[in-house]
Image (cartoon, rainbow, N blue to C red):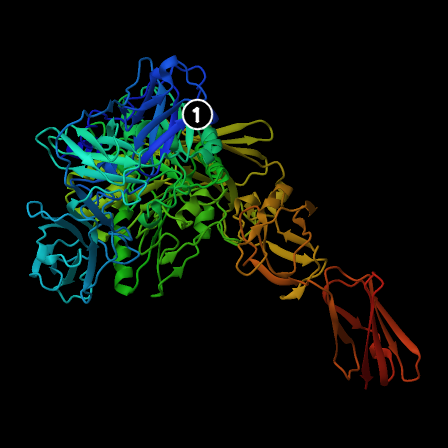
Amino acid sequence: MRLLFATLFLIAYSGQAQFRYGNEWIVPTQSYAKISIREDGVYRLTYTELVRAGFASDTINPKNLQLFHRGHELAIEVSGDEDGRFDKSDFIQFYAEKNKGELDSLVYYHTTRANPYQSLFSDETFYFLTVGSKPGLRLPSFVGKPTNQAPEPYHLEQQITAFTSQYSFNNSIGLVPPVQQSYFEEGEGWTGDYIGPDSLARFQIRFQNRVVDSNQPPTFTFQLNGRSPNKHQLWYALNDNSPIDTLSIGSFSPKNVQLNLNENVIKNESILLKTQSLNVSAYDWYSMTYLKVVYPQRFLMNGQPGKYFYLRPNTANQSVVQIPDLNTNAMVYALTGRYATAKIRNQPEQFIVPNTSVGQTIFISNEIKKSPAVTVVIFPVINPKTNNYLIITHRSLLESATEYAAYRASDVGGKYKPLVIETKAIYDQFNYGERSPMAIRRFADFILSGGPDKHLLLLGRGISFPDVLKSSETDDLVPTFGYPGSDALFTMGLADFPEFVQAIPTGRINATTNQQALNYLAKVKEFEQAPPADWQKRMLHLNGGHDQGEILYLKSLMEQLRPIAESPYMGAQVTSLSKKTFEEVEAVDISQPINEGVGMVGYTGHGSSNTLDFTIGYCSAPGSPIHNKGKYPILFFNGCSINNLFYKYDPLSTDWLITPDKGAIAVLAGSFWSYPTSTQTYAATFYKKLFADSTTLTHTLGQLQQQVNLALNPYNGDLTLRTDLQQIILQGDPALHVFPLAKPDYAARKLFIEAREPGTIIANNDSLTVNLVLSNAGKFYARQSVSLHFTKTYRNGTVTSQRLLVDVTSVRDTIAIPIKKELSLKQLAIVVDGDNQIDELVETNNELSLDLADWPIIQKASIFPASALPDQLNPILSVTVDDRALKNGDYVSANPVVQVGLTDENQLPLDNLRNIQTYLKPCSNCPFALLSPESGSAISAISLLATYRLTNLAPGSYELLVTGRDAAGNAAGNAYTIAFKVAEVRAPTVWKIYPNPGRDIIQTSFTLVGKSAPKSAQLQLINSLGILVDVYTATPFVGENTIYLERFQQLPAGLYQATLRIDWGDGQEEQLQEKLIKW
């Protein structure tokens, strides 16, 4: 069993078993012209086409031209090679077939593909032309000698109708096997539309130019495929007068039926196949995969540009073929399999085909085809012993892949020996140019021939959903294996590893742009180069559930994992949060623990690629409270499809991975369904390998996952567990060391003093407490004691010291040391592990001192220094648009200036300007876009101001969203949001006065609508005698303006006329009048 899996994946169809890696035919010193073929036919390559493609045609010896397909050299025709030169009039001609999926059989596990007439990945195949060191194979011509042999009366036509409208394992329809593996299974592939139990299906086949021969009755083969998880019983009939027969089909299995057709079932040169289910179950589904009839047919081209003829065996070992409508320029090729073995020279209307003792296939063509694409390929020389960090990427991502490789090759990056290779190069070198996951598997097998101990990073998004797999080639940057997607399957069972254990630890960066990959690389650099920190030992456990019982059950699963994390060697501090409602999706705010730092978030519950039922949200969302720069956890999620990366979606898990300066450093989750029992087994094993197994504490994350599979592989008979082994996808760098558990790392984090009596100041106390915050970010040993050397230095130079021995907790503890208050003390100092008895990860973080020079200030405090207290107060955010606080839905100009102020009780250095984030949403269906400030300034030590100048806004509705944080990460409450509008044209001004009548201060408001603000606004008050009694002026802006008539209360009672004049500054002036009553 162990070797069978690898063997099945490596042996090709008959005639190709000698190629294990797929690159054995390549001569690295030679260049090759790669010729695309998408349909069957006779192809011609001219001198001009080869030169245009960059193939050095002028200097070659055409006698040495060789053509290869799937590693085998083919015999070709070369016109004009007699002179030893390849001239402008010369050409190469050959017969070729499109990709019919023959190599797809390699991806099936313990079975074969059911539909032999449809490829899974691409209809395109490639032929490779090169100039060898010896003469290439040439297609022989055969001219038959005149003979009295009778012409063949007919050939055996193969008429095939293949149905490819649906993929048999299609969860978008809803009926798939209850447990779906990633490797290709029996019955998986392209087939026809599903047929329900209440449907009578009809399939008609018409014969063409049939010859009736009682000794050669037609044969009819059809294949049905089960499409629902139950046994299927069907009846079928041929026409209305034929006997009815029944058959059984497995749940998702194919079933072939072959019949010899009697003349009485052929009506008007056609047959009608009818099928219907005998079951009454609503979901008893099946489908038709293909129909095939083989029957005697006259030799006719019938106007077709190309046609196959299938000759019967002839004891004379040659056959005379006579075709009345044969074109005099027609080309006739004898075929063996899919390759031409001879070109037959024909005489008018007839020709002789040799070697027909066992039958023969011939192809006749009246046209010459051109390849849609010819390119030059130079195969990279790969030494499997050289590289130990492999990056497979797409051409569009080469920039980021190259930078990633440079980092991994550096001292700080691990001094790996990286290899960056494009997917297309792997297809070319290891799968004959054809698109298939087998190319990467063969490449990995070749690399492993140079030894194990490697890591594989897949840098780019892949596509696995079958309905779009063939049509989305441009989006399938770096493929995955199978459906549901599995990255581990690329190397499972290779290099003598067990069949469901990846031979190379593998991770993926699900990026579609270079910037996304570089965002992640920046986080990796920050993560790996940071010193160990005790936040990494804090963990967060989350669980969902649809009802109370399920919530409690899933919580109990997470609680089973807690002791593993809390025990040595991790000694984690685990916080648990459970879903509180029975809503389908409940949002949970985990920003506080995430921002303060957790090393890992574990989750079990329901999920999909874009949400969890206890959802943490997208951390890139505008206004997201997640701000955990430098404190990136790994996410371990048990839930359906959370790591279903392989489609057009932008998954939540990927968002946490590639969002810059926040989110996660790695995500492990399944790509498809999750089963509570098996995923809990997987999770418990992962926790043990990660936290409690001394042999794996220093493994990389990819190696840890490999060890999990190694431990669980003996139980892969459990098909649900087998899916976990394949489908738990590691998003992130497989070479990461996520927890620093090689050694302990005791660190002195804070040193401060406080009054002995709580709630009092130090001046009112005779004694003090010296507090040392001591942490261990590394390996935890229970009952380990640590020595402290405590030193006091006095103003007169006297120094006293004492040695303390303390028992420490696994993460962080505060050690309290009582001392007498002495105003002559100048400094306190502590050295952790002062005896230097403990081998630690870092030896430079063990000392702290506290300066006590300024006792008058110290006496007034209860704790010194004040920075020892955590900052828990939120900052204040203020937003103005064009120097005013905007009302929701108001108008603004097309060039508004937005200013955002942030004020805190503590200092805000100017570099904290990045903590102000401002987004603009230009339409209701548009995403928010992050704005960059035009300028930023420090208004004071505790206040910052960011200015954004928006220009040439198009008419429409907008939404502004602003968030702010202080230096400690405290958010300024909820995000500020405001909607506003930009007008396309100027509109009449709307003016309101209230209260009216009135006696005190009157408020007038007028809304200006236009692309730019007016020059001025003036409001005049005229009494009943026509005398101007008051004037108010304002600098107006687009939107709602307000003028307060503060002096109105001083006017006598009576009737007044208010006149508002708006000068738009372009020669246009608006004047509005209202009556105003003073009582």
Task: Say which quarter of the image contains residue 990.
Answer: bottom right
Q: Is residue 309 left or right of residue 578?
A: left
Q: Is residue 1054 visible?
A: yes
Q: Quadrant of the C terminus?
A: bottom right
Q: Secondary structure at mark 1?
A: helix
Q: Around disc 1, counting alpha carbons within 10 Å, would you say few (fewer than 14), some (14 to 19), or many (20 or more)?
A: some
**Front position in the image: 572 or 87:** 87
Residue 991 position, x and y percent, is: 75, 74
**Front position in the image: 292 or 1004:** 292
Is residue 525 placed above or below 207 in the rendered structure? above
Q: Which residue does the numbered mark 1 point to in the structure image?
A: 50
Residue 180 position, x and y percent, is: 23, 49
Task: Say which quarter of the image contains residue 910.
Answer: top right
Is residue 892 placed above or below 290 in the rendered structure? below
Question: How many numbered discs, if any?
Answer: 1
Residue 376 position, x and y percent, is: 42, 26
Task: Say which quarter of the image contains residue 888.
Answer: bottom right
Residue 163 position, x and y percent, is: 25, 51
Question: Measuring 35% from the left and 29% from the top, which residue is drawn there?
Answer: 428
Question: Measuring 26% from the left and 57% from the top, which residue is drawn there?
Answer: 193
